[in-house]
Image: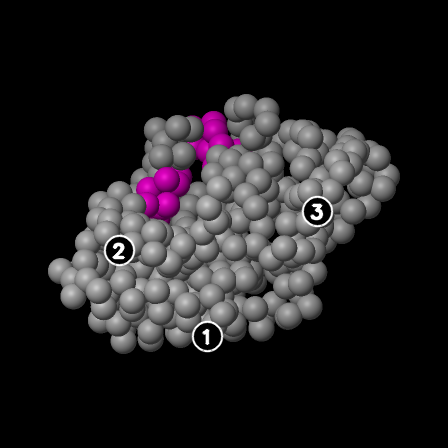
Amino acid sequence: MRHYRLMIPGPLEAEPELLAPLSQPLRAHYGPEWVSEYREVLKLLKALFRSERAEIYPIVGPGSAALDAAIGSVSGDGSPILVLSNGFFGERLRQIAASYTREVSLITAEPGRPLEPERLEEELAHRPELKTVAVVQGETSTGVLNPLEEIGKICRDHQALLLVDTVASLGGVPLEFDAWGIGLCVSSTQKCLGLAPGLAPLAVSPEAWQRIESGQSPGWYLNLRTWKRFATEWGDSHPHPVTMPTGLMRALQLSLTGIFAEGLESCWERHRRMSALIRRGLRDLGFELLAADECALPTVTAVRVDRRISASELLSRLKREHNLLIGGGLGELAGKIVRIGHMGPTASPEQILPTLYALEQVLRTAE
């Protein structure tokens, strides 16, 4: 099978040493030796989420599985939830929420624009029954970074539980679980953590647990009550309700160790600098950036296509002529934009500069 360089918004190019554990002999997912290693990974994840208070559960599956678990566990009894959406993945939050409760409210912003905290303030002030708010930190469909710190403060002021999707931002963008008052936070391994898909780390605050335990939630596997029961009752030998992908957990340990060896703040800064590099290069090539600089997501950049070349032709020629994959638009932006991922190991000049060169070559011959 032909190999393509992945500059899509995830999954991405993984370092060979991080893939190595996936080809090693399978190990048992229970017993004292395994539990010791498992707990070490949870400790590293707590540090990544910047939390002393959270309990961590590495849900086996994609990020959407953990979002399903988080939303279902707090709103599975039909309680109301407010979703903030400014793109395809904010809309996914709404769809997941609507599968659990009929009482889903929505605040939206135009694609390419960040959410406005003032609108959240007004909504919560007028509707005190809204006690859960869900939002995407980094909206990869548009390359927008939402103002999570401000959103968290408003939720704290109104005693609302904040549920956050950080699938495309954890590890590449500043996040402070405790300091920002986040209740539940979901991520995934195939983005900034630089791994294959298959694990979705989920952080749960004590306040979220109070909400979960005071209500009713459906299901078993994606019910956080189940995960907590196994962590408590089976903690010494099998602290999770399902078979854990031991190779991927070992790869996650290596990835997290590498992030902290670089320094988490340094990792955030690297993503910011590489975002500025690719945005400058795309502007020089004549592209119009979808998100303004002040709300640009440091891990994904979206640009509008113009009359020089269609989105489909650009994607096709990059793949055919340069062995390079970038992403297309989703939903209402399909055919109107293209998206470039630069996260984890692809947030580097060695990956970004060849991508800009390939784009330049395709545009030269399109004109």
Residue 250 showing in the rendered view: yes
Q: Nearer the viewer, residue 47 or 270?
A: 270
Q: Secondary structure at mark 1?
A: helix
* Chosen colour scheme: one colour
Q: Nearer the viewer, residue 94 or 198?
A: 198
Q: CA distance from mark 2 to mark 1?
A: 26 Å
Query: In the rendered structure, which disc, 2 or 3, sits on the residue that comes first in sequence?
Result: 3
Say which residue label 1 marks: 273
Q: CA distance from mark 2 to mark 3?
A: 36 Å
Q: Residue at x 56, y 30 (%)?
A: 222
User: The disc labelled 2 sits on which kind of residue?
Assistant: Leu
- Which range is magenta? 70-93
Residue 56 picture location, percent across and down: 65, 46
Residue 353 picture location, percent across and down: 42, 71
Say which residue label 3 marks: 21
Residue 290 showing in the rendered view: no
Residue 313 picture location, percent across and down: 23, 52
Say which residue label 2 marks: 314
User: The disc labelled 3 sits on which kind of residue?
Assistant: Pro
The mark closer to the camera, 1 or 3, is: 3
Residue 259 picture location, percent across and down: 63, 63
Q: Residue at x 49, y 70 (%)?
A: 350
Q: Residue furthest left?
A: 307
Q: Is residue 207 left or right of residue 315?
A: right
Q: Residue at x 73, y 42 (%)?
A: 24
Any magenta on residue 86? yes
